[in-house]
Image (cartoon, rainbow, N blue to C red):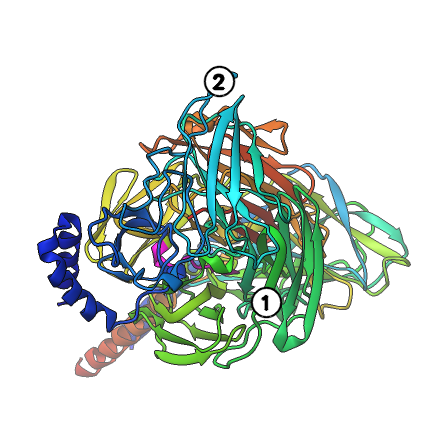
Amino acid sequence: MFFGLALAFTALAQEAEVSVQTDFDANLKTLETTTPVAASALPVSGVFYSAKHVNWPPFPANVLGLDAWPLDSNVFILDDLSSSAVRRSRVGGGMMDDDDSGPPTPEVGGGGSGSGSGGSSGSVGSITNDPQGLWLEITGMTNETSSLVIHPGTTNSNNGTYDLLYCTNLTSPISWQWVMRTAPGQTNVNVTNATDPQGFYRASLPNDLKANDSLGTDFWVGYPNLDSQGGTPNFSLYISSSVGATGIVAIAGQSITNTFSVTAGSMTNVDLSAMSMIDFDVIESYGIHIVASQPVSVYAMYFVRAESTAWTCYPTSLAGTNYCVMSHETTGAGNSEVAIVATADDTTVTFSPSASADTDSFTTNLQQGETFEVGTFGGDVTGSWVSSDKPIAVFAGDTLSFLPDNVDWANPLIQQQLPINDWGTEALALSFAGRTNGDTYRVLTVYSNTVVTINGVIIATNQPGEFLETNGLAGPVEFQGSKPIQVAHFANGTTWDGFDGDPNEILLPSVGFYLQTNIVFSLNSNNITGDFDQGFFTIIAPLSATNSTYVDATNKIINYEAIGSSGYFGAEFRVTNGISHKITSSQPIGVEVYGWGNVDAYGYFGGIVK
Amino acid sequence: MKKLIVNIVVIFTFGTMVIQNVRAQGTITYLSNLGQTSTGSLAVGSDSWVGAVFFTGGNAGGYALNSIQLAMTGTSGSPSGFTVTLYSNVGVAGPLPGSSLGSLSGSASPTTAGTYTYTAPADLALSANTPYIIVLGEATTVANGAYAWSIENSSSSGSGGWSEENIVLNSNNGGSTWNYSDQGIPQFALNATPAPEPSAGWLALMGGGVFFAWRRWHIKRC
């Protein structure tokens, strides 16, 4: 019924005929009786029709930052009937006012940061559709410098500071890169090194929920329950920033408040050793709230001798309302688990276990910062669904898991989950450096009849919540799904290959979600924050970036090998010293970070864009 | 009567053959890195217990441990009361000594460099595909005297699926807590006897019993 209605909407909107306007209005009234999906839970890219302006062609992205009614996974009706709902977020492009003249057309005057020595190329333009009047004007490109003017309109809630974002094309998924934040009152901005043949800029308030990468100024993080046989845990948040930042890390339910300061291009460590982990089956205010003055990356580390794990933290802007979780089963080791942190008050959360979870469903109501965790001993929560009516942060894994099952030794596994809207159809990896008998991978699906291929070979056709696992896969590997998939990369236990390491888990973002600059941490063996004597990066780069990717500016990544037919190449880099490392490239790249110790390991992914 | 004696002899011979078949496999050195070049040593004291981890092989019936050979490199100070104990593993995330399975008999003062043999108590059974931990200790603190267990760096694999773990366990509090390190691989050899599969043994006994009953019935009829 709903799907049929959705198709009708699509067709009507595309035809944009006056004669069907009445039908559209009638159907819209039906839709209006339902609650639209919050903008923060929508994908940035897709097909977005205006409910107010039915004759407009669709938007290629939710550039207005509006709530919307989904017609399918990629097509939406924007809730723009009320002008007060309009957010402030703009793409540099053709001028547009809030009338029926048409949607933003980035291709027209697309803000091309034209290349060419000393010349000006590409057209310039701007878009505005904001009742508060914020718009961005590209006034020219000269000597590879883009000149922009921010017109604040009546926006005054942010002391006159704005974030400038950039991307090279608007093809889905859009890879917005954070460029800079203006000084208070600054309206004229020059962006140098604008060498791309085409580029798009976007101005937004710093708290814009569509900053679209794993850097942010607001995070909600949780530490799920983890095994600590090896001693007293050390909890550390590693926070990096390209531009420098100060901030606060607070846990309301534990009366913990720490401040931090990180200088530009570096990393700082916030010690949370006094913290308690989230407990099972009880509501607690154990959410860790991180607020930063400038965009930062946050990584969580849990160190216990022989039982460490790490994960990439995603900002509140990337929190979603619909998750299908990845974990790993265990036999006689620990609990497969899911922990939830509410980012807003009065959030209703529903957990629907998979068949393998061997636990009950539940619905609970959480206030901002409150946490709830479910665990199952002997079960596997992989494929379970977590949904909510407001954005939540979800962490899943295992308190202690063998990999593969019954292979010594076990290790905790935790990764912050990505909402299914942030899944893609292709994930790439190299087997972990140092391991000789290959790695374990899991591929999770959420759509019906998803055909999964590994290195071009069809492996399975899976249904929602189903996963496949492969052990001992070595070398470059390319995973593809006919519909979005989530791939997890696991290291196996020590005795799998007699290597001085242990299990770890890294959720692999899909191609197109890579970040261009990653500031990451690699731990050594000081026995306080880590006991790792080998650290590695695995770099996944497009061909065009294989000659221009560096660690700490001077260490060029070499010895790439092709990854299937993806057009991407992978290489390993051995980290020999230091904790903070900046990985830069001319193109967005994937970065797996991991380390090995005595029956210990950790791993995480550098960062993503959405 | 003569037939009865013959049958008893047959049965005895059959049973003996089963036992001989097991023992014919004899003591096997499943794991040894004694031939590797020593790269250093680990100090063993009352405040420095040292553990080495090994995995048994896949023999379905398990094994009987016969002896352990240790490569020692000498002493410092005046140590005494050297002990060798085998522990079960209770660790999941990493090896962790659990219950003592028994102390091994041998020199209580391996002061000169060389290989020392420590004999396991009778019936020290090892399960298949299971980690165990050899723990060395002594009566004095390292500051007053320590024995030195030789280590090497090149891991060597054993036979029959046996393997050693590239890890060293240390305890400075008599085994209450343990730390891991990768200082090297302690040098030792393990000599064991494969045990028959329980099912095979029971089959042999049951087969012998049936044969004996049949013979008794046959004798009575005669």
Asked whether the viewer can see residue B117, the reply is no
Q: Label 1: few (<14), some or many (≥20) within 10 Å?
A: many
Q: Residue at the location (51% across, 55% down)?
A: A154
Image quadrant in which you'd find residue A376: bottom left
Left or right placement of residue B147 versus residue A412 in this view = right
Q: Is residue A259 above or below residue A332?
A: above
For residue A556, what is the image quadrant? top right
* Residue A60 spot, x, y in % from top left: 30, 45
| Relative to A429, residue A507 above or below | below
Which one is in front, A522 or A512?
Answer: A512
Residue B191 image label? none
Can residue A453 be found in the magenta stretch?
no
Classify A102 as above or below A351.
above
Q: Residues within 10 Å of mark 2 (few under 14, many from 20)?
A: few
Horizontal and vertical percent position of residue B165: 58, 51
In this rendered view, identify the residue nearer to me: A566 or A130: A130
Label 1 lies in what chain?
Answer: A
Q: Are marks 2 and 1 in contact (CB under 8 Å)?
A: no
**Residue at the disc numbered 2:** A119
Q: Secondary structure at mark 2?
A: loop
For the residues labelled 2 and 1, the Cα–Cα distance comes to: 49 Å
Q: Secondary structure at mark 1?
A: strand
Q: Which mark is residue A288?
A: 1
Can the viewer see residue B41 in this picture?
yes
Residue lying farthest to the left in this orientation: A19
x and y, in percent, of residue A77 in the image: 26, 58
The magenta segment is A412-421
The amino acid type found where label 1 is placed reads Ile
